[in-house]
Amino acid sequence: MSEMEVTVIKEYGVVHLRNALTPAEQKTMFDEVKPKVRCVSKNPGIFHASSGEPGSPHRNATLTALGDALFSRCAEAVTAELSAEEIAAEPSLKRLGDAASGANPPSVREVTGAAYPKGATMANHSDLDRPLYTMSVAVGDACEFTVGKRTTRPKPNERSGRPVTIQMMSGDAVYFDGGGVPHEVARIIPDTAPAYFKRNPPAGVARVSVLFREAC
């Protein structure tokens, strides 16, 4: 597997972590969510994969452990890339700094996702009127993921301006404030999925995006 590489889009507090998951970890995540994946139209199909505290009947221990590991990897990469002052100045990055220092370890509480059929997109939007720190990881075909483009009806907390497009490959992670930073899936790039996905994809599905969140 290629080594992890990090890019930080400082104006939005967005982190792109390339090769965040090994091929084996990608397959593990895919196997855990695959039974929940459904596509019934040309639009992304939303699904729930895990929620609750340890011991909850709706909690998937494999997925939450993987989510905690992703937060930790992202935190370590960011603290190695940026100064303490840069991290402290941006709320979403400060969350990662606190995770890296041990002051506030990662604690994933919810895992949801979206299954994209071939040719699907997700319109530009932000999720809430408050911060919603999200770790997004996908398996399957790559996509063009754009952050920072102004929405048609901005919420008071929206952070928009210069749009930035990330090519997000299978196994990459993007960490961002989904509440305040507008984001969209502009395009699915055909025939870019890894071999394990191509061998046995869910019916009609080209890409599965999994979202890890600590609290909602």
Image (spheres, rainbow, N blue to C red):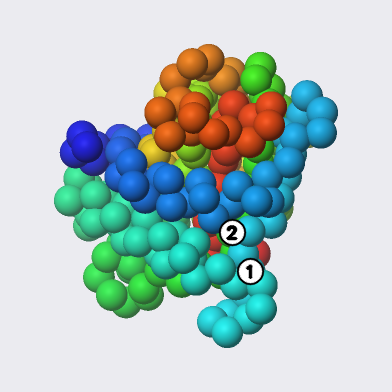
**Mark 2: few, some, or many residues within 10 Å (few <14, many ≥20)?**
many
- 174 sits left or right of 111 in the view: left
Report if residue 11 is visible in the image. no
Report, in whole angstroms, how far the alpha carbon at label 2 lies from the one at label 1.
6 Å
* Pick the front one: 27 or 89: 27
Label ID, residue 51: 1
Q: Is residue 206 above or below residue 81?
A: above
Image location (x, y in percent) of residue 21: 34, 46
* Pick the front one: 188 or 192: 192
Figure quadrant of the C terminus: bottom right
Q: Earlier in the sequence, mark 2 or mark 1?
A: 1
- 133 sits left or right of 194 in the view: right
Q: Which residue is mark 2?
A: 111
Q: Quadrant of residue 19?
A: top left
Which residue is situated farthest in the bottom direction here? 55
Q: Identify the residue at image location x=32%, y=36%.
A: 18
Element marked by disc 2:
strand
Q: Is residue 94 above or below residue 106?
A: above
Q: Are marks 2 and 1 in contact (CB under 8 Å)?
A: yes
* Pick the front one: 86 or 197: 197
Element marked by disc 1:
strand
Which residue type carries mark 2? Answer: Val
